[in-house]
Amino acid sequence: MSNRRFIIIFIPILIAVIVIGVWSIRKFFRKPIDSLQKITFAVSSHSFTGYTIFVALEKGFFKDEGLEVTLQTKYPHGKAILKALIEKEADLGVTSETPFMHAVLNGEKIYALATILSADKHLAIVARKDREISTVEDLKGKAIGVTLGTNGEYFMETVLLLNSISREEIQVFNLKPGQMFDAIMKGEVDAIATWNPQMYEIRNELGEKGSTFYADGVYVAGCLEGNCHYIEGNIHARKRVERARKLLAQTGIEPERLEMFNMSAAMGNRFAEVANEMTTRIRNMEPLWEEKKNDKG
């Protein structure tokens, strides 16, 4: 299995997908059920994006498909998993779409295999109020902890862009997810940009002494219609997005905050274009944070 590479991706709009290498997936899944094929699966314990893999292993789903899975859990985040996969240390892995997009732009031959997870409020910036941070604008001049090259950094950059704050106007500290809690509690940084579960733990510990800033919009990336591994899965996803947009409109929220885009896993440039398009769109809308900044959900 050392010459086959697979990945699972978690999208900032919070959708996880599996990514595969250039070798034939059909051959990968044609092993007879009585001859288990050994594979190595890389996941991170610092994000629930990979928790479904633990469930599948516990339930015996992999074995049912003729696979004997060995888990590697030493990776602190999806970026490290992607690096391990590219270097052939693992056959499959879970990561977000931000490092995936960078890898594709750098010429790596990897492809999205499957969507495995969607989540609400998975990413956020959490700040200490005692550092005089009550609004996003207050982040100017502050020290922010973030894991560079991940969705956390992309989310932070998007929030800054939407609020006309340049990277030069903040201090950035590159932290691993497991370092976030101690760094903000000890006052080594004023805020952190990260994902669950550490984001929830920090918010819970700070309580009323913390400020939390979520996303104001969501985009869903699906494979090209008529050219998808799941045949009709992307079509069903679009119908769900359309229903969700109608519900947003009924509740008084602009449906344009949610959009689905179809693209192949090899279209790294398109991923970047979509991200910029949504950023510009949301920037021209009123923020939702004022209504939800006290929301503990």
Image (cartoon, rainbow, N blue to C red):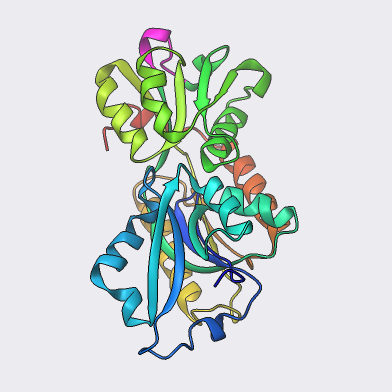
Q: Is residue 100 visible?
A: yes
How far from the left and from the top, in percent, is residue 20? 57, 69
Instruction: Work out whether 234 lies above or below 106.
Output: below
Q: Tag count in the figure?
A: 0
Pick the front one: 140 or 199: 199
Q: Residue 133: within the magenta?
A: yes
Quarter of the C terminus within the rendering: top left
Name the spot of residue 288 as percent of width and height, x first.
43, 34
Q: Quadrant of the N terminus?
A: bottom right
Q: Is residue 175 above or below residue 282?
A: above
Could you say where residue 2 lies in the image, as x and y percent from the top left?
58, 69
Q: Can you tell which quarter of the image residue 25 is in? A: bottom right
Task: Give yes or no for residue 256 being in the magenta stretch.
Answer: no
Q: Residue at x 58, y 26 (%)?
A: 163
Above-or-below relation of 14 to 193: below
Q: Position of residue 58 (x, y in %)?
A: 25, 66
**Is 216 situated left or right of 85 in this image?**
left
Q: Residue at x 49, y 22 (%)?
A: 136
Residue appearing at x 47%, y 16% in the figure: 189
Q: Between residues 251 and 110, which one lies in front from this camera angle?
A: 110
Identified at 52% across, 61% down, the residue is 90
**Magenta residues (range):** 128-135
Of residues 278 and 45, which is closer to you in this image? Answer: 45
> From this viewpoint, is residue 10 visible?
no
Camera-nearest residue between 203 and 6:
6
Left or right of 156? Residue 38 is: left
